[in-house]
Amino acid sequence: MGDPLLLLLSCGQSVDTATAENQMLQAVVGFADPSVESIRLVHGDFRRQIEIRSQVGAFVVTSVGVGPIELQAFNSTERKVGPARQIL
């Protein structure tokens, strides 16, 4: 099996916040292999599990924070599928 996540696009935009840190609104667009049931997104201290609801495996994830986004695919038994992907 190849990579379980096909990442087609990542983009970002600076966001004005009340904190001193320069935060970014980031989005990642792609497709997941049929074996993938969910994707865990980690962005700094923020962590979220996102269910793949599209019948063709399409997904868009967004986050606001500092630093890279990490995406990890999981199957229906909550086992990791493939390596984690870092998006800078």
Image (spheres, rainbow, N blue to C red):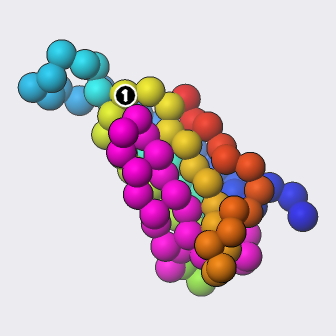
- The extreme top residue here reads 20
Q: Quadrant of residue 24?
A: top left
Outermost residue to the right: 1
Quadrant containing the C terminus is: top right
Give the image location of residue 11, x and y in percent: 47, 37
Up the image or down, 14 lies above or below 38; here it is above
Q: Is residue 26 left or right of residue 10?
A: left
The residue at the point 69 percent across, 62 percent down is 80
Q: Which residue is painted at 14% across and 28% down in the image? A: 17
User: Is residue 6 part of the magenta span, yes or no?
Assistant: no
Q: Is residue 69 visible?
A: yes
- Who's the residue at 50% across and 79% down the image? 53
Q: Which residue is mark 1?
A: 66
Q: Is residue 44 above or below residue 2?
A: above
Looking at the rendered image, the quarter that the N terminus falls into is: bottom right
49 sits left or right of 71 in the view: left
Residue 77, placed above or below residue 88: below
Residue span colored magenta: 32-53
Does the magenta-highlighted stretch encompass residue 44? yes
Closest to the observer, 13 or 22: 22
**Helix, strand or loop at disc 1?**
loop
Three-letter amino acid code of the residue under disc 1: Val
Give the camera-side residue of 30 and 40.
Answer: 40
Q: Position of residue 26 (x, y in %)?
A: 40, 39
Residue at point 9% right, 26% down? 18
State whether residue 87 is above or below residue 39: above
What percent of the width, then of the height, locates residue 5? 69, 57
Q: Residues within 10 Å of mark 1 (few under 14, many from 20)?
A: some
- Closer-to-camera residue (72/22): 72
